[in-house]
């Protein structure tokens, strides 16, 4: 079985990693993925101050930290691959997930109004994924 574990280092994502460690056999193949949105998507006026070199360096540093925390939450499980991408999270995850048997995500707790307006990645994945989704 090939599992794609979406992680951002949040409590929900780390709980999902712990769930995998506790409930799946040791021989499952686990791939970690983290998807970041470019800050200029949120703040178009910030494009003037945007420095792509700095963004890439900070993204790599963030990815390293997130993947290290997620590997620790997996309790020593073998991680087959780590994928760090830029883009719209649900769109990137939907595309990458096509070659996996299961996608696992953690539930992030947002205030009700924010959730109503923005939705969540897990909600969007539930609508768009063509492979099974486990929300922890």
Image (cartoon, grey):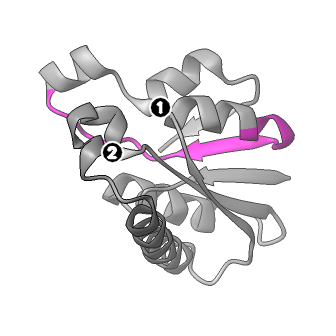
Q: Name the residue located 41 percent from the left edge and 45 percent from the top edge.
A: 38
Q: Is residue 110 magenta?
A: yes
**Outermost residue toward the front in this view:** 48
Q: Mark 2: few, some, or many residues within 10 Å (few <14, many ≥20)?
A: few
Near mark 1 (Cα within 10 A), the count class, few <14, some 14-19 or many ≥20, is many
Determine whether the residue tagged by mark 1 lies in a helix, strand or loop. helix
Q: Magenta span covers which residues?
A: 96-111
| Mark 2, secondary structure of its residue | helix
Q: Is residue 3 magenta?
A: no
Residue 90 position in % (x across, y down): 54, 31
Look at 68% across and 78% down and name the residue there. Answer: 77
From what the image shows, is residue 44 above or below residue 38? above
The correct choice, above or below, for 92 with respect to 61 in the image is above
Q: Which quadrant of the view contains residue 127?
A: top right
Q: Position of residue 117 (x, y in %)?
A: 23, 15
Which residue is labeled 1 in the image?
A: 122
Residue 131 visible in the snapshot: yes
User: Picture coordinates of residue 87 (x, y %)?
Assistant: 53, 39
> Between 88 and 127, which is closer to the camera in this rendering?
88
Q: Which residue corresponds to mark 2?
A: 39
Cα distance, mark 1 to mark 2? 21 Å
User: Residue drawn at (29%, 21%), measured in percent from left and top?
Assistant: 118
User: Which is in the foreground here, disc 1 or disc 2?
Assistant: 2
Left or right, residue 105 beside residue 117: right
Report the side of 7 relative to 120 (left or right).
right
């Amino acid at each position: 079985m090939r599992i794609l574990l979406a992680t951002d280092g949040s409590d929900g994502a780390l709980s999902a990693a712990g769930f995998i460690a506790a409930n799946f056999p040791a021989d499952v193949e686990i791939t970690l993925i983290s998807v970041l949105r470019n800050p200029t998507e949120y703040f178009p006026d910030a494009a003037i101050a945007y420095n792509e070199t700095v963004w890439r360096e900070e993204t790599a540093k963030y990815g390293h930290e997130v993947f290290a925390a997620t590997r620790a939450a997996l309790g020593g499980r073998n991680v087959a691959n780590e994928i760090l991408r830029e883009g719209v999270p649900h769109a990137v995850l939907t595309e990458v997930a096509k070659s996996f048997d299961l996608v696992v995500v953690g539930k992030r707790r947002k205030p009700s109004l924010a959730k109503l307006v923005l939705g969540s990645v897990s909600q969007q994945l539930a609508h768009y994924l063509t492979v099974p989704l486990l929300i922890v």
